[in-house]
Image (cartoon, rainbow, N blue to C red):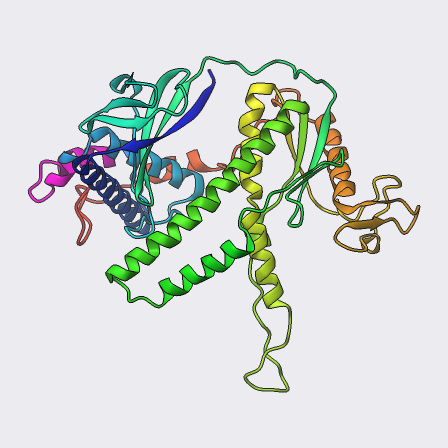
Amino acid sequence: MMLTGRKYLLDLTPGQAAFAERIGGACRAVWNTALEQRRTYRRRGAFIGYHEQARQLAQAKSEPGLEWLAEAPGHCLQQTLIDLDQACAMYGTWKVRWKSKMRTRPSFRFPEGGKIAVERLNRRWARARLPKLGWVRFRWTRPLGGAVKNAIVMREGQRWYISFLVDDGEQTPARHAKPDSGVGVDRGVVKIVTTSEGRFHHRVFATDREVEHAATLQRDLARTRKGSTRRRRAARRVGAFAARIRRRRADFAAKTAHVLTRDHDMIVFEALKTTNMTKGVAPRPDPDQPGAFLPNGAAAKSGLNRAILDKGWRRIELAVRSKARYTGTCVIIVDPAYTSQTCNVCKVVDRKSRESQAVFRCTCCGHTEHADVNAAKNILTAGRAELATARPAARAGARKPRNRVGRKVNRQATAAQDPPTASPGLAGIPRL
């Protein structure tokens, strides 16, 4: 079974848009309340899971003052608890973030595809029937291509979108159309994607004039008063500009992924930790001049961080993984250590061989090549070595599961403890 997503622009009536906002607010309140309850139980040395919280949620709908819970679709609220349970199991209860009303966009999921009906109205429009929302119109930009499994309604800026998860019935090919056509991919700042074949994939997402315009919008936003109407308008303008850049970045990732997966049966990436790579550099105080700081390149590092985040390295990798399911391409992640300092010919590692950003000249054998192309060839060599020593039972290209060691043991240990008395309600928030 091959699952894929289809995203469309919704055309909600004012009443439907207001109701969708209330549903999103209810899901956000359930998330925050259930997360606080989980943390309270953890402080007491106990554990509460999805099933108990779902039972308390059903009871809370009949309590006075909580009629807004009964107004929202029950499956959307239950799906919020399921998502919270998965997030806590994946990252830990204390690392899961709250959902803010101002910073978190409204979003809710209808998990049962059997209760969702989709009808084509004409060449440009279609409609879908959602529980309690009724029939909603959306822009028909591409066919569904399969049976609907679930649907997510979300708001981005001032627009509402619906995303269907469909089963298109396709299967991953057992073999790529072009066997023995592996390629190494080096992701950079000057050139976003460089392959071991010497091809460069690059795009400028924002021109110099657009960057200046974005700075003007940010300055106008900073000069407004919090909670004012002018601030909301300025925030909408900033969000609209950021969404435009985000769509360009997603378009580039999709097109690059299509080209890579179409022409290669194996794609090797570096395991880049962008979160660690974009950490700031704290300025060091000058011991000779009190109140002054040493020039340690903090401003240059800040510019490098913005450039790295602007290129969308992670989005490219995810797009390649998604496209690889349809072509049978094997996606491998390797250690990036010394890939830019190693000569692809003689395998000598020397940081002096990297003369500049674009020039690599080996100090041992004199081999000269574009630095990013040389790094991409080293990445491909490391990927072939890892594929040769891979476990036979592991499917090539599959994502490694996250570390869940001790999860079952910890749950059994906490469940064996005596729970708090009679599921007390949290202070100041409704019981779930």
Residue at image location 80% in from the left, 53% down from the top: 354
**In the rendered image, the vertical position of residue 334 relative to residue 301, given as above or below:** above
**In the rendered image, the vertical position of residue 349 relative to residue 77, given as above or below:** below
Percent x, y of residue 212: 50, 60
Q: Which residues are magenta?
A: 52-70
Say whether residue 237 is left or right of residue 316. Answer: left
Residue placed furthest toward the left: 64
Residue at image location 60% in from the left, 87% down from the top: 289
Say whether residue 202 is left or right of residue 148. Answer: right
Percent x, y of residue 22: 19, 41
Residue at image location 50% in from the left, 54% down from the top: 210
The quarter of the displayed image where residue 76 is located: top left
Percent x, y of residue 152: 33, 31
Say whether residue 67 is left or right of residue 361. Answer: left
* Quadrant holding the C terminus: top left
Looking at the picture, tell me which residue is in the foreground, 366 or 339. 366
Looking at the picture, tell me which residue is in the foreground, 68 or 116. 116
Residue 212 in magenta stretch: no
- Magenta-colored segment: predominant secondary structure: helix
Looking at the picture, tell me which residue is in the foreground, 103 or 225. 225
Asked whether residue 416 appears in the rendered view, the answer is no
Percent x, y of residue 8: 36, 29
Residue 65 in magenta stretch: yes
